[in-house]
Amino acid sequence: MKIHPLVQRELSKTEKQTIAHFCYYFDDKACFALLGDYTIVALSAENACDLELLRQEALENMETVRNTPPDFQTYVMDDSFGLVAMNAGVYGVTPEQLTDEEVQAGRMGVATALGVRGQCLELCHAGEIIAFNLDAQ
């Protein structure tokens, strides 16, 4: 992982786990901004060499999420975590693995999905970027 922190502190264990989680989901081929625990925004690989362009793109994507209807899709991932994919490349993952019933049904429960979506919206509204993952290949 090529992590570029934007905060003046050590990344938390959960933040590092979130980056690793999304590196796994994207097969180490995506550039993204960490917005907070369990939430990222996917970014263009062509901007991976310019941190200011990445920052602008991430802020624009977060603004898009804030100013459009909060459409989202849910997925049960192969590691039994749930993924919420919102417009503008904003993604959130459940903090814990889904229940056996959710995994077997192949879908997240509504309450779980809305909780993750709510966190994504809150972090987009806050507008803070914690770090960039620059591993786009």
Image (spheres, grey):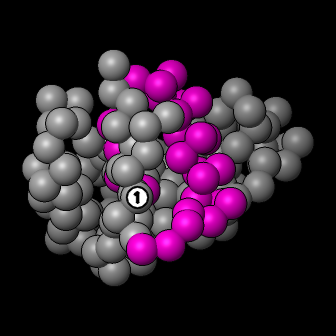
Query: Who's the residue at 40% across and 23% down the image?
Result: 29
Would residue 29 be seen by someone viewing this image from the given angle? yes
Instruction: Name the residue at 33% across, 19% down.
Output: 137
Residue 40: x %, y % from top left: 42, 53
- Residue to which mark 1 is pinned: 5
- Which contiguous range is marked in magenta? 8-34
Asked whether 25 falls inside the magenta stretch, the response is: yes
Across and down, in percent, residue 33 comes to 35, 52
Q: Label 1's element?
A: strand
Badge 1 amino acid: Pro
Residue ID at (55%, 67%): 10
Residue 126 in which image quadrant: bottom left
52 on left or right of 86: left
Direction from residue 77 to residue 35 in the image, left or right: left
Q: Is residue 117 left or right of residue 32?
A: right
Residue 98 lies, with reference to residue 22, above or below; the image says below
Is residue 37 at all visible to an observer of this figure? no
Q: Does the magenta stretch include residue 15?
A: yes
